Image (cartoon, rainbow, N blue to C red):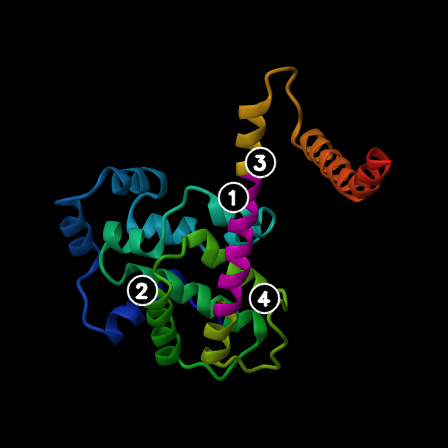
Amino acid sequence: MEQKTIGQLIVQNQNTRPTTNYADRRQSTLQAVSPKGIAIRKKFGSNKDFLQKVNPDVQVCFAKNEQAAVVGDYPTLTDINAVYGDGFASDWLLPQIQNLASYTGAKNLTLKQEIELARVIATEYHHLKITEILLFFYRFKSGHYGRFYGSVDPIAITCALRDFIQERNAIIAAYDQEKRERNELEDRSKGPTLSLEQYKALKQEQNEELHHLKTIRPFIKIYESQ
């Protein structure tokens, strides 16, 4: 499938469903935008700027730092809809989906299916950050969710997203655990500052000592009773 330009995608998407144009969306959202929305616009610019900056080529950047993609300070699909207008998340997802179809050599997906898939993802996974979506598509293209021989089923993509959610939750859990350990280290350390690795080694040593004491305590009691 020949990958279409962003401009072509915008026109096709607009012709497929009734919506206001980008100028109208920009005017409507600027009437009441939150501080977070202002920050997003400052970082990503206009609707067109956003599509150009956060294109499929950016996927590999966050594949190199998965934790940053998941826990970093980036807007969600809900956020970009609020800032750039209702339906913008679907418009942004469309090039990501077409890039995936082009990469896998899939020729079975029609434009209507691609648009519908973008809507489903934007609705069901609106809480995901744009960086998490980028990471998901990179993982899909890397074969993380199986092989596809010239045909990509939209259901396969949404099922893979469900698997990705579990992986994403595991990354968040690991990050939270590391954060708790760092906070505990800061609270308990009154002497020289320990690194996280040193703290973990110290805690493991303490646990081993505790286990040893529990093991020999019965023998100590027997000895003391004699």
Q: Mark 4: which amino acid?
A: Lys
* Residue at image mark 4: 141
Classify mark 2: residues with Cα within 10 Å, few (<14), some (14-19) or many (20+): many
Q: Mark 2: which amino acid?
A: Ile
The image quarter in which residue 15 lies: bottom left
**What label does residue 176 carry, if any?**
1
Q: Is residue 171 highlighted in magenta?
A: yes
Q: Position of residue 226 (x, y in %)?
A: 87, 36
Query: Mark 4 touching mark 2, by CB under 8 A?
Result: no
The image quarter in which residue 202 lies: top right
**What label does residue 181 carry, if any?**
3
Classify mark 4: residues with Cα within 10 Å, few (<14), some (14-19) or many (20+): some
Badge 2 marks a residue whose secondary structure is: helix
**Start-end of magenta stretch:** 162-179
Going from N to C along the chain, the mark reached first, 1 or 2, is 2
* Residue at image mark 2: 10
